[in-house]
């Protein structure tokens, strides 16, 4: 009987410890629920890394001032099945960006989709990448 408790604790630790990182991942609560469109955005950098790939881009605000933005997309394996690759975006590419901006007002957001000048579309998978506002479609 005295051996059962230590054995149970060890088994519990074996099961719970690997799953801790699963609980550490954030959700979408930091982002607004309305998709924002930014036309004529110029890609400045594209990082293809875990846990999220990130698109850095510049766009002129309403006053004509250049604003620097960053928008995360899903992990490389999650978005690769949707057509994304490490070479999908290059510095200098001019795109239209649809994303959920941060509620904090900082120039960051969660990508919904990217539309190229030739009409090609790359969508994000983690929040659905749908056409409308408010999340997955």
Image (cartoon, rainbow, N blue to C red):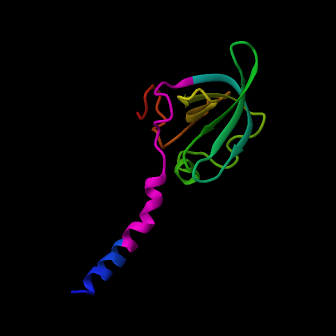
Residue at position x 67%, y 43% in the image: 88
Q: Measured along the vertical axis of the image, is residue 125 above or below residue 135?
A: below
Residue 115 picture quarter: top right
Give the residue furthest to the right: 92
- x%, y% of residue 80? 57, 50
- x%, y% of residue 63? 72, 12
Number of callouts in the render?
Answer: 0
- x%, y% of residue 114? 60, 33
Residue 5 picture quarter: bottom left
State yes or no: residue 42 in magenta.
no
Q: Quadrant of the C terminus?
A: top left
Residue 67 picture quarter: top right
Q: Measured along the vertical axis of the image, is residue 90 above or below residue 10?
A: above
Start-end of magenta stretch: 13-36
State yes or no: residue 27 in magenta.
yes
Residue at position x 38%, y 72% in the image: 13
Give the residue furthest to the front: 2
Q: Measured along the vertical axis of the image, is residue 26 above or below residue 36?
A: below
Residue at position x 51%, y 25% in the image: 35
- x%, y% of residue 131? 47, 28
In front: 118, or 123?
123
In front: 50, or 31?
31
Please give left or right for residue 9 compared with residue 50 in the image: left
């Amino acid at each position: 009987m005295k051996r059962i408790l230590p054995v149970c604790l060890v088994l519990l630790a074996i099961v719970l410890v690997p799953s801790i990182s699963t609980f550490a991942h954030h959700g979408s609560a930091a982002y607004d629920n309305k998709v924002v469109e930014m036309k004529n955005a110029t890609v400045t950098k594209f990082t293809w890394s875990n846990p999220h790939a990130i698109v850095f881009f510049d766009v002129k605000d309403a006053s004509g001032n250049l604003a620097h933005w960053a928008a995360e997309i899903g992990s490389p394996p999650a978005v690769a099945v949707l057509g994304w690759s490490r070479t999908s975006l290059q510095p200098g590419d001019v795109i239209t960006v649809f994303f959920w901006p941060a509620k904090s007002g900082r120039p960051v957001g969660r990508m919904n989709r990217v539309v190229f000048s030739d009409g090609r579309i790359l969508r994000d998978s983690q929040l659905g990448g749908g056409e409308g506002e408010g999340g997955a479609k």
